[in-house]
Image: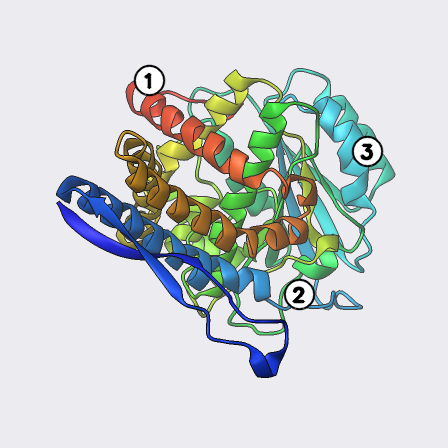
């Protein structure tokens, strides 16, 4: 047995006059813990310390980052790349918002990837209406490797401008200032700009979970970019130089991976000196979320496969983050089977974790357009962890072939 002495309570004596106040005596109580309890609680506390590194030394950077004002004018022409496969409903709703951006000179390149739902006819009509719309058509052909990366490559080849801005067919900019903020920075050394894309709010637990997972993914990649370690971006809202793409042979290094046209490209070529982020609310790009659990699981399975191709240092630091979160909750649950004193201490460690996060994540949720979730984040944090753990096991043992559409 080991004994640990804690303050039990404070007793203040004397009348309510400062000149007559006396020092309050402190009474102590003895907590007796077994060696296994001390070891388990020590591991729990260490897991908390590791998590706090990410919270206080990484994510806090994004919470305190100054959001720059959007420039007044577009200085250089740019090309917007959109890939679509049977997306006529989304194109009808969202393509006009891309064509009416407040930017002096730009083109929108839409790649029609073997659609059969009327997309071709709709795009022909839109091309007659908008002179800055360019349509690239991919036909069925067994000789080429189908997939989104091929479609993106065709769009990049067709683009006539050096600065490329990417989004998806089911996305809509938050304002007509989107391209103004995602334009090529004045610093010519900047080759990659990482934007942010929240999901549209719908009813239900699945939607809340998807938006919360997107929030933490964004907090991670945007914060690490600020820290000088950019490791991913999202194809719904990002930009880079056309010359950077061809200089590094495009997606050749990971063409066999179904996903990764966005995060794997950034992971391979972004660094502290050539990458910036954009988080101004007017430059956010809203996207339609999955509405079924099956669709969401399929999407996360694609992302899981891409993550295996990250650089070793990125895999290490991201794996460390997940592992210690897993251990934290695991050891907390285990502590509930210990003595009452150990349970109280474990509960205090969990409460401390929640309190510290409460000073940072609600602010970030509001900054990243998810303010409605800030009151639920402790519960969603646990639910998301359980869901992603389950999905990780399913991804490892499930079928490997996953198509982008």
**Which residue is tagged 2?**
67
Q: Pointer 3 and pointer 2: residues touching (CB < 8 Å)?
A: no
**Residue 181 spot, x, y in % from top left:** 70, 60
Left or right: 128 with respect to 139? Answer: right
Asked which quadrant contains residue 114, the reply is top right
**Residue 259 spot, x, y in % from top left:** 44, 34
**Which residue is tagged 1?**
398
Label 3 SS: helix
Cα–Cα gap, marks 1 and 2:
42 Å
**Which residue is tagged 3?**
126
Q: Quick one: label 3 or label 2, which is nearer the N terminus?
A: 2
Quadrant of the snapshot with the N terminus: top left
> Is residue 138 among the parts visible in the rendering?
yes
Front label number (1 vs 3): 1
Q: Quick one: label 1 or label 3, which is nearer the N terminus?
A: 3
Against 303, is 52 above or below?
below
Asked which quadrant contains residue 34, the reply is top left
Q: Residues within 10 Å of mark 2 (few under 14, many from 20)?
A: few
> Is residue 113 among the parts visible in the rendering?
no
Of all residues, the one furthest to the bottom in this rendering is 19
Query: Which residue is pictured at 33% across the width and 41% down the height?
Result: 328
Left or right: 368 with respect to 72? Answer: left
Label 2 SS: loop
Residue closer to the observer: 149 or 233: 233
Q: Residues within 10 Å of mark 3 (few under 14, many from 20)?
A: some
């Amino acid at each position: 047995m080991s004994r640990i002495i804690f303050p039990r309570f404070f007793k203040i004596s004397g009348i309510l006059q400062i000149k007559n106040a006396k020092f309050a005596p402190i009474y102590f109580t003895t907590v007796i813990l077994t060696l296994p309890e001390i070891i388990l609680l020590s591991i729990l506390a260490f897991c908390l310390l590791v998590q706090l590194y990410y919270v206080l030394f990484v994510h806090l950077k994004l919470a305190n980052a100054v959001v720059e004002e959007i420039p007044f004018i577009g200085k250089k022409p740019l090309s917007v790349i959109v890939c679509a496969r049977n997306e006529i409903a989304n194109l009808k709703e969202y393509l006009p918002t891309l064509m009416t951006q407040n930017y002096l000179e730009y083109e929108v390149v839409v790649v029609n990837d073997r659609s059969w739902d009327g997309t071709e006819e709709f795009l022909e009509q839109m091309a007659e209406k908008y002179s800055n719309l360019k349509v690239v058509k991919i036909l069925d052909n067994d000789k080429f490797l189908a997939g989104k990366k091929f479609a993106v490559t065709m769009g990049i080849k067709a683009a006539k401008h050096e600065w490329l801005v990417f989004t998806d067919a089911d996305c809509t900019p938050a304002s007509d200032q989107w391209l103004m903020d995602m334009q090529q920075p004045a610093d010519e050394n900047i080759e990659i700009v990482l934007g942010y894309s929240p999901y549209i709010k719908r009813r239900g637990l699945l939607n809340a979970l998807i938006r919360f997972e997107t929030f933490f993914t964004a907090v991670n990649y945007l914060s690490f970019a600020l820290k000088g370690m950019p490791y991913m971006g999202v194809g719904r809202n990002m930009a880079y130089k056309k010359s950077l793409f061809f200089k590094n042979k495009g997606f050749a290094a990971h063409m066999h991976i179904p996903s990764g046209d966005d995060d794997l490209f950034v992971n391979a070529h972004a660094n502290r000196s050539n990458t910036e982020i954009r988080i101004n609310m007017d430059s956010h790009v809203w996207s339609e979320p999955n509405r079924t659990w099956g669709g969401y699981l399929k999407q996360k399975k694609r992302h899981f496969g891409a993550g295996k191709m990250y650089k070793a240092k990125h895999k290490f630091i991201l794996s460390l983050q997940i592992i210690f979160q897993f251990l934290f909750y695991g050891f907390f649950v285990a502590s509930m089977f210990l003595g009452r004193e150990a349970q109280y201490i474990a509960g205090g460690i969990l409460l401390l974790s929640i309190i510290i996060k409460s000073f940072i994540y609600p602010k970030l949720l509001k900054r990243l357009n998810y303010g409605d979730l800030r009151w639920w984040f402790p519960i969603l944090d646990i639910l998301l962890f359980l869901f992603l753990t389950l999905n990780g096991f399913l991804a490892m043992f499930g079928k490997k072939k996953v198509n982008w559409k």
